[in-house]
Image (tube, rainbow, N blue to C red):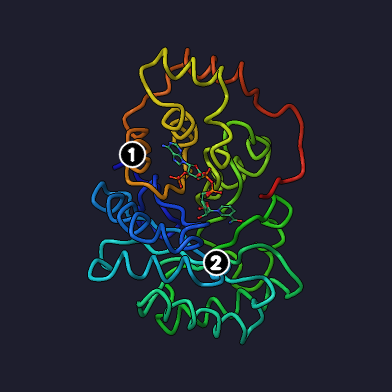
Amino acid sequence: MKTVRLPSGENVPALGLGTWMIGDDAQRRADEIAALRRGMDLGLSLIDTAEMYGEGASERIVGEAIAGRRTEIFLVSKVYPHNASREGTVAACERSLKRLGTDHLDLYLLHWRGQHPLAETVAAFEGLKAAGKIRYWGVSNLDAGDMNELKGVPGGSGVAANQVLYNLSRRGIEWDLLPLMQARGIPVMAYSPVEQARLLKDRRLAALAADHGVSVAQLALAFVLDRDGVIAIPKAGRAAHVEDNAGALDIVITDELRAALNALYPPPRRATPLEMI
Ligand code: NAP
């Protein structure tokens, strides 16, 4: 398994499992749990969830999927910005732990910036860390300016990751945020790495993937995984899709393939505002 190094020196899987929309349809529950378990079997043992997803439904399914296997998993969840006050963050974390059926999170993220000052959220995260409720904390949807601001907040240099939108069709972070994160040794977690399946409908990309004997999802994921310090967290509610995605780890992006991908989806030529889904 390819891994990515956290600032602490600990390595985590570069390919994990997203869970947005998992738990939204009760009829899909068994398939979704099976998909998550298949992912764990394949070593995709980083699971990303959030209190927002299905208002706790996703965390409950993850809890069921990881029951008895907690020690295999690097578990990530997120606090809603409106809960991210000094006390609210702690209370939200306790609720997430309960739904997940665990006593600690490996990584706890601020889902996006809201009305609460970063200093308050960071203080709450540091308190949770000291109490053993979380091992690391991080942020999500913070742009380069936000990351610089965070660095100036007391305790802000303890940030362990920033989860942002990144895929072939959303390459804006390559201009400023990704180099900044790489220089600081803080991983980027690429969310929506197959653009919520929209990339999979691109006929030109499909032709390129076919030429290389891989699936479109594999090619899109391999592009993201090729970057230093980037963790991809595709969501797949079907075991077959999880298996397909795991195959991305075997793909080498050669210079020729990179040039072909750049021709289809050019890198940014100027700074652009960080996009969000
Ligand atoms: P995504 O992973 O880019 O795409 C998910 C979609 O792609 C699902 O419809 C899935 O179908 C399909 N898919 C996945 N692998 C496939 C394959 N091999 N073949 C065919 N279809 C495939 O989008 P996402 O869910 O938005 O992003 C991934 C994760 O990132 C989320 O689940 C969440 O954990 C996180 N996220 C975070 C934020 C944030 O603000 N921090 C925002 C968005 C997402 P099936 O489900 O049918 O398998």
Q: Nearer the viewer, mark 2 or mark 1?
A: 2
Percent position of residue 52, x then y: 58, 67
Q: Position of residue 97 (x, y in %)?
A: 43, 78
Mark 2 or mark 1: name the one nearer the start of the chain.
Answer: 2
Judge by depth and name the residue closer to the eye, 55 or 260.
55
**SS type, badge 2:** helix
Q: Which residue is mark 1?
A: 246
The numbered disc on residue 54 is: 2
- The residue under the point 53% across, 77% down is 126
Q: Considering only vertical position in the picture, is 167 above or below 40?
A: above
Q: Residue at x 27, y 70 (%)?
A: 67
User: Where 145 sits versus 118, above or below?
Assistant: above
Q: Indicate left or right for 92 with 38 as reference.
A: right
Residue 45 in sight:
yes
Q: Is residue 164 above or below residue 60?
A: above
- Mark sitting on residue 69: none
Mark 2–mark 1 Cα distance, whole angstroms, equals 26 Å
Please say whether residue 158 is visible from this viewpoint.
no
Residue type beneath disc 2: Gly
Tell me if mark 2 has few (under 14), some (14-19) or many (20+) residues whose alpha carbon lies within 10 angstroms of its own.
some
145 left or right, relative to 202: right
Image quarter in which the N terminus is found: top left
Across and down, in percent, residue 147 comes to 67, 56
What kind of element bears circle 1? helix
